[in-house]
Image (cartoon, rainbow, N blue to C red):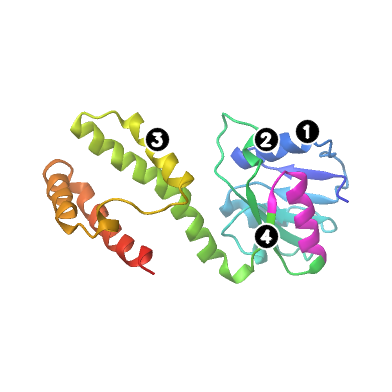
Amino acid sequence: MINSIRVIGAGRVGAAVTARLRERGVVRETRDPELVLLCVPDAAIGEVAASVNLGPWVAHTSGATPLSTLAPHRRRFSIHPLQTFTHSRGAEQLDGAFAAVTSESREGEETGYELARILGLEPFALADDVRAVYHAGAVIASNYLVTLHRAASELFDEAGAPAAALEPLMTRTMENGFELTGPIARGDTTTVEAHLEAIRSCKPELEEMYRVLAKTTRTVVSR
């Protein structure tokens, strides 16, 4: 069982993780921790890992960074909370989220799973060589959702409609299991073309995005 963890990094992830460890009574500050958890920007992981004395487990929380970045440590793994974080919230952001655990050994994987459960996360194993594919999926689901919401909000503003009305629509789409509805589901190409013409006239910078999304939706959803 993990009894002592040193967290390095106090950004969005680090703050939430530290708050949860405090809640769970896990000793965080000790001269000889069992685990050093790096919650630092991806570009800093290698440098920070190199500054940590050999001996304890060393792990990072990046979804895209390979384990080799933790060299020269051999007792290493990664745990990526599959969640979006904000400074305005605390440890509750971890509740119910999944966590990708990557390790080169059974002991490392077991340690990663244990840490995930301490943090209130549901762990699953992720191979090191598919990180880029995995992380791309995560970015599409989270970051690009922000892009879609902002683009839709701009079109609502043009129409004089309240952008706040989009949130219940987006929430219900998720609650409905992401079941596709609307003109593409109906095969209504006339309406899609009308959309493109309207966007071209008021927000031409969004036309290509709509066109690509329409094409991708036809391809992906029809599989």
Image coordinates for residue 218, horizontal then vertical, percent: 30, 63
**Of labels 4 and 1, the one closer to you:** 4
Q: Residues within 10 Å of mark 1 (few under 14, many from 20)?
A: few
User: For the magenta stretch, what is the residue range?
Assistant: 107-122
**Front-most of residues 39 and 19:** 19
**Of labels 4 and 3, the one closer to you:** 3
Q: Amino acid at mark 4?
A: Phe
Q: Residues within 10 Å of mark 3 (few under 14, many from 20)?
A: few
Q: Is residue 202 left or right of residue 23?
A: left
- Residue 167 numbered mark, or none: 3
Residue displayed at 56% across by 39% down: 85
Contact check, label 1 and label 2, Cβ < 8 Å:
yes
Residue identified by numbered label 1: 23
Mark pair 3, 2: CA separation: 24 Å
Q: Amino acid at mark 1?
A: Glu
Residue displayed at 78% across by 44% down: 6
Q: Residues within 10 Å of mark 2 (few under 14, many from 20)?
A: many
